[in-house]
Image: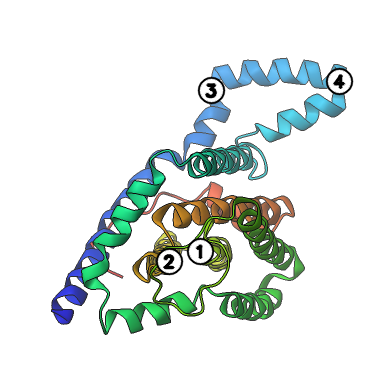
Amino acid sequence: MVVIVVAIVLVLVLVLRVAVRRAALFIWAMTSKVPLKVAGSSAWARLRTFWQRLEARYPIPFGFVACRFDPQRPTGLPMTLVMVAALYLLALFSGLTEDILEAKGTIASDNLINAAFGPLRTEPFISAFLWVTSLGNTPSVVAAVIIATGFLWSQQGIRVVIPLWITCLGALATTGIGKLLITRHRPETMLDANAMGWSFPSGHATAAMAVYGFIAYAIARMRPDFRERFEVAYWAGVMIFLIGFSRIFLSVHYVTDIMGGFLVGGFWLLMGFTMAEWRGWHPSLHSGMQGQRAPQDDGQSH
């Protein structure tokens, strides 16, 4: 039974990897030339003329706004879209928090999903997920940040290390404050004896998304090849998902706790992206990526 379940999971992970890789290649091919097409369009030329007139009249405010919507600058339109995505995650978290406080169907669905994993909570799955969940506890996350600090400092210096620490500390602080304000109880039956404190949002899910996500971003950003960057991002995503899922499997969090943690972690992850790019980290890569051709899917598995 155990061997069958593990084999099924591995097959699903590998099949999903192929599907996501092909989707990423398709999206890259469709969007990589969009900034250049927008910049070369007549509509953009007329809009720039209009903005230039406003900028000449009101140089400070309109100059700043024009830079934020420049599709040819990494700190322009791409960063603006990242900020919009971060605010959207914040809005989703606010709505989820409201639903939990008002118990709008979340209690029944959370208990139903939690009970569904009851028959599977046996050895060796319990021991395996106890090990997985340990990757998301505070000591492991702090150790990962310290090790990543040394590595990234030697490669890129302080320009990426500061966003890493801000992302980590911001995620941990937001989770702690959220737990104290919402005071949601954990499930009654818990298989992780180290689980303490309130339930929402999940600290493990938040830290995994924010910290491991940013470390994966920092490593992938140094890789010149699209496929290499995809592999780093995909397997980091699998790790983050498993850490979040382990909290549900071990019955120390509800599904909505994990969702809340991922939203908070995603917000701080996007904030880390913004800070790293704003500080001009690795500008040579920016210029190289603008002229890079969309990679072709050769069908090989890496």
Q: Which mark is residue 228?
A: 2
Mark 3 lies on residue? 41
Q: Earlier in the sequence, mark 2 or mark 3?
A: 3
- The label nearer to you, 2 versus 1, is 2
Crowd band around label 4 with a 10 angstrom C-alpha radius: few (<14), some (14–19), many (20+): few
Q: Quadrant of residue 210?
A: bottom right
Q: Which mark is residue 224?
A: 1
Mark 4 lies on residue? 58
State the SS at label 2.
Answer: helix
Instruction: Please state which amino acid type lies under the numbered disc 2.
Output: Glu
* Marks 1/3: CA–CA distance: 29 Å
Residue at the image point whose x is 47% and y is 80% from the top: 193
Against 38, residue 1 (above or below) is: below
> Are the two marked residues, 2 and 1, in contact with CB atoms closer than 8 angstroms?
yes
> Are the two marked residues, 2 and 3, in contact with CB atoms closer than 8 angstroms?
no
Instruction: Please state which amino acid type lies under the numbered disc 3.
Output: Ser
> Are the two marked residues, 1 and 3, in contact with CB atoms closer than 8 angstroms?
no
* Marks 3/4: CA–CA distance: 25 Å
Instruction: Please state which amino acid type lies under the numbered disc 1.
Output: Pro
- The label nearer to you, 2 versus 3, is 2
